[in-house]
Amino acid sequence: MTQEEFEHIAPELRDAMLSIGRNFFGNDADAEDVAQEGMLSLLRYVESMDAGKKHHGLAIRIAKHCCMDMVRKRKRATVVSIDSVNTPPGSLVGSSPHEELEAMEIRRAMTEAIDHLKPSERRLFELRQISGSSLDEIAAQTGIAKPSIKSMLSAARKKVLEELKLKMKSEK
């Protein structure tokens, strides 16, 4: 396929990728990232693509892979950012080694519980609970209505709490 032929089908493929990104992440910003990454991936293989075939299925598959790659990158980044915020051992005034170990276990359990959230829930949870963003800031950033944000945050908190309860029960 030539570059010119690809340019004719590119808008349709990009729209399909945007749709996959919106469905997966629940916001336009991440959907744009998915579409951009996906189109870059397709551009690498333009010359080896057949001009007569439909490439909609390929675009969808690439978009799904881009979504999963973004989730994996965020998980790694979140673990690093949460760990970098944690206080180093021995830094809590008047705390015993046992108290420090308990605090470290609680942080680890919390990180694991957050990891079990869906990407859209996780993003809202992190914006509100970790970054401390207000509902207005979250609404402006995500394009989600405040009542929807409230209900999604409530559901996310309940899931995190249930995960923590299960973790505590299994450790006893």
Image: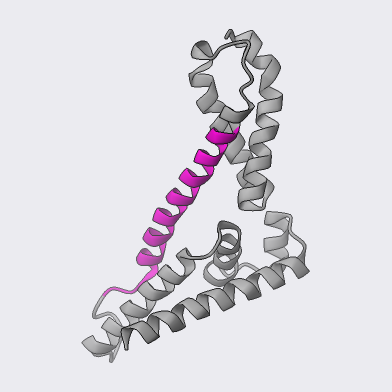
Q: Does 2 sit above or below residue 165?
A: above
Give left or right: position of 22 versus 169.
right
What is the magenta segment's predominant secondary structure?
Answer: helix
Q: In the image, 114: left or right of 94?
A: right
Please tell me which residue is depicted at 71% across the width and 26% down the height of the picture. 12
* x and y, in percent, of residue 137 in the image: 69, 62
Give how far across and how far down residue 64 sits, in percent.
55, 41
Is 156 within the magenta? no
Residue extent of the magenta highlight: 60-88
Q: Residue at x 55, y 35 (%)?
A: 61
| Colouring style | one colour
Q: Quadrant of the N terminus?
A: top right
Seen in the image, is 106 located left or right of residue 162? left
Task: Pick the quarter of the image with the C terminus.
Answer: bottom left
Return the residue nearer the eye: 14 or 127: 14
78 in magenta: yes
Depth check: give the residue in front, 81 or 168. 168
Residue 8 to residue 27: above or below:
above
State how many labels appear: 0
What residue sits 53% from the left and 44% below the top?
Answer: 67
Q: Residue at x 64, y 42 (%)?
A: 20
Front-lying residue, 138 or 93: 138
Q: Quadrant of residue 56?
A: top right
Res 17 quadrant in image: top right
